[in-house]
Image: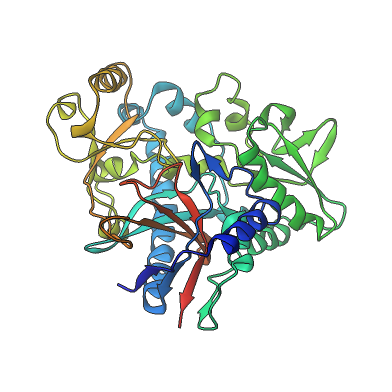
Amino acid sequence: MDCHVTERLARDSYRSYRLDAIFHGKKWDPQIYDRSTIADRALILGSADWVELNNAAAELYAETLAVETELRRFAMRPDAKRFLPAKAWRRLRSLPDLEPRASVRLMRFDFHPTENGWRLSEVNSDVPGGLNESSLFPEIWPARSSNWTLPGHPGRTYVQRVVERYGLTARARVGLVHATAFSDDWQHMAFLQELLAERSIEALGVSPTNVELNDGRMSFRGAELDAALRFFPGDWLLFSRWGEPWFTRHPVALSNPLHALYSQNKFFPVVCAALGLEIPAWQRYLPHTSELSVRDLFGAAGLLKPSFGRVGEDIARIADLEPAKKVAVALDLLLGTGLWIRQEQFMPKNLGSVAEPINACVGVYCLDGEVIGGYGRLTSERFVGMSAADSPVFIAH
């Protein structure tokens, strides 16, 4: 495996780069508690490793779409309730049929270098973030080598595809659907807003509650939207009391469509196994995943993960759980279903030293089956979570 990190930037160089990342890279959440979320190192992949991740992501993307189709069929059956909370099952069943070629689908597959090669922790097929960091951080990195190339500009490629697929022209109106209370959500959408503005397309930041839905169309303050880009998590709509219209009146020109929840749910490998669905690429890269039981909380090995989690929240070794957390999870399991999984634990490859360990994640963006970029994250922790620092990714040749 050819995957390593650079030396740290010198203090003055890092200070300048960090300011550029905040003001030019739209990194408006540069700190979590006392930790910077802007890495002072870059992540370098060998060309052969990047080819492997490209091939894996393309294969995983195709399998994921096929799984979504099968799980949608299965959701129409009453026995699907044993894998999903009742409200989630009802709302997913209410989604209208979707023509895949009529929509734009962006996924991000999160790979990790381990002692046994590349392994996958998840796919963010619902609202993959990091487009501003992955697109802009490599451009402003101050210590680039002539032997490095960029894995792509996912933000620009994504916007271009949206414009083409939905037939957007100058003066078109696009809704940027996000959780408007969070600046880290708006930084992502503000980046896309600028890219759309370059094409004279008006992009408006909106909350899901501001959008009126009618017959596959969307409007905002009485004016029709020609398309919408969604960064509001679909599972928040799935469980919210006001989210139902987004399923029963699902808009046509929405990227990503809410059908992505079938694969965003980390429980889907369990359902595939129960239905006998073949997913060879997922089985090759994803650690073994199973349904969590109450008994597992008391002595089982492996990791605990929330089915609809993202950014690494609530991931823990089962053996390390505090008693209060075990009780809370046990109540979830007794009162609901399909909310937690158990997964084998892989051993990450330490890209640093014993004194300063570095655990890395490479997010590979796949747009309509085509790899368009990479997103790096570094941490000294065992799990790459919310406090991980964003790092530019380069390919060495």
Residue appearing at x 34%, y 46% in the figure: 381
Residue 192: give x, y in percent of width and height: 70, 52
Q: Residue at x 66, y 45 (%)?
A: 187
In the image, residue 260 above or below residue 48: above
Which one is nearer the viewer's eye here, 84 or 372?
372
Q: Nearer the viewer, residue 174 or 393?
A: 393
| Colour scheme of the rendered structure | rainbow
Tell me if residue 379 comes above or below residue 246 in the rendering: below
Whole-percent x, y for residue 55 in the image: 40, 70
- Say which quarter of the image contains residue 280: bottom left
* Residue 174 relative to residue 149: left or right: right
Q: x and y percent of residue 108 in the render? A: 48, 54
Which residue appears farthest toward the left when viewing the image? 299
Quadrant location, the N terminus: bottom left
Residue sitting at the far right? 171
Which residue is at a point 54% across and 77% down the rendered structure image? Answer: 149
For residue 246, say whether it is visible: yes
